[in-house]
Image (cartoon, rainbow, N blue to C red):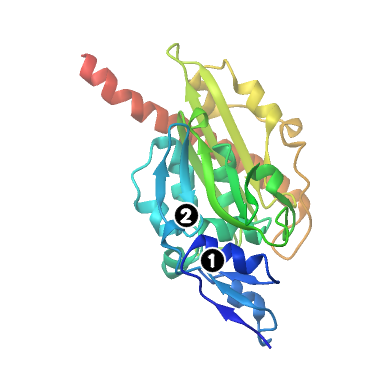
């Protein structure tokens, strides 16, 4: 017999998880489509009563996004320019209705290679907060997603928050998504870029992530390292080589071939770099005007 429970506290939810197998229901935007025409056969743990898991807060060291925080919450919350890529990705997650109900944690727990939120979160060195009756643990997002529909969650655990260390929140960012049409589409490829600039106008920190071109979204470490010390104005026409994309392992599927995805990744990373450079220039303009 299938059980349904709607706990009113995180402790109650964790107690239930420790005492049997449950499928967690939050926004439901992945939950219900995955069922298709099949009837429910698993116990359902509905966490929509857990108000403490929704919202964006700050600690001394992190920005903390609660597991039930929706994509619309992300778009509406005042956040620094380093979050612009995440806000742009949030606007690409399905329709407005899906953005209103779908959760950030659900997007990463679903572990789709084409999850729109993952590349933008990787830019911010996101950590996943995982809770169980025995306590909490934290894991980098890059390690948490192990493959297509695979995470490190074990029995009795649930994601309670995504934590973003403040040390990774400098600079400006941009997100680009390529699909077969403009809206309501699964990505063929997507890219997110964050760049921070020092007082000398040179790049002090860079983060670049590509999704839908590997089983798990990947940071482009070699390109990030190469950008350090470059003049920010060079981003608009930065030459990109195939070697910069060696971390990617695209596949052939109905949305595009592996070769097409490699070329697409190169192009949209280039566009995201140029867009980020433009955002940095806009940030600098008011400061120059005030100085004048």
* Residue 116 seen in this snapshot: no
Measured from the top left, where is residue 167 in percent x and y? 51, 28
At 64% from the left and 61% from the top, the residue drawn is 110
Measured from the top left, where is residue 7 in percent x and y? 50, 71
- Mark 1 vs mark 2, foreground winner is 1
Label 1: how many residues lie within 10 Å, few (<14), some (14-19) or many (20+)? Answer: some
> What mark, if any, has residue 140 been given in the picture?
none
Q: Upstream in the sequence, badge 1 or badge 2?
A: 1
Left/right of residue 160 with respect to residue 198 in the rendered view: right
Q: Quadrant of the C terminus?
A: top left
Measured from the top left, where is residue 144 in percent x and y? 69, 48
Residue 270: image quadrant is: top right
Vertical placement of residue 63 versus 196, above or below: below
Find disc 2 in the rendering and name its residue: 90
* Residue 212 seen in this snapshot: yes
At 60% from the left and 39% from the top, the residue drawn is 269
At 48% from the left and 43% from the top, the residue drawn is 85
Vertical placement of residue 67 versus 207, above or below: below
Vertical placement of residue 138 versus 254, above or below: above
At 70% from the left and 71% from the top, the residue drawn is 20
Q: Secondary structure at mark 1?
A: helix
Q: Out of 105 and 160, give the one closest to the viewer.
A: 160
Q: Out of 268 and 116, give the one closest to the viewer.
A: 116
Find disc 1 in the rendering and name its residue: 12
């Amino acid at each position: 017999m299938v059980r349904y429970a709607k706990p009113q506290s995180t402790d109650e939810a964790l107690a239930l998880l420790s005492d049997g197998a449950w499928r967690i229901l939050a926004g439901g935007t992945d939950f219900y489509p995955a069922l298709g025409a099949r009837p429910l056969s698993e116990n359902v743990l509905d966490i929509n009563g857990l108000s403490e898991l929704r919202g964006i807060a700050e600690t001394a060291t992190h920005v903390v996004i609660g597991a039930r925080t929706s994509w619309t919450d992300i778009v509406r919350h005042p956040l620094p320019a380093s979050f612009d890529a995440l806000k742009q990705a949030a606007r690409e997650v399905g329709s407005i209705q899906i953005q209103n109900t779908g959760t950030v944690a659900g997007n990463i727990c679903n572990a789709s290679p084409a999850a729109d939120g993952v590349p933008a979160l990787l830019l911010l060195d996101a950590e996943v907060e995982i809770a169980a009756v025995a306590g909490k643990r934290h894991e980098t997002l890059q390690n948490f997603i192990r493959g297509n529909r695979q995470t490190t969650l074990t029995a009795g655990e649930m994601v309670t928050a995504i934590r973003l260390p403040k040390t990774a929140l400098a600079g400006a960012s941009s997100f680009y998504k390529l699909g077969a049409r403009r809206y309501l589409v699964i990505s063929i490829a997507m890219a997110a870029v964050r760049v921070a600039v020092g007082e000398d106008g040179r790049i002090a920190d860079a983060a670049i992530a590509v999704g839908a071109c590997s089983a798990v979204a990947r940071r482009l470490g070699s390109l990030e390292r190469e950008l350090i010390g470059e003049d920010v104005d060079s981003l608009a026409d930065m030459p990109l080589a195939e070697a910069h994309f060696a971390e990617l392992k695209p596949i052939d599927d109905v949305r595009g071939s592996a070769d097409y995805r490699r070329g697409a990744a190169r192009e949209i990373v280039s566009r995201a770099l140029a867009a980020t450079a433009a955002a940095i220039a806009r940030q600098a303009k008011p400061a120059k005007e005030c100085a004048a």
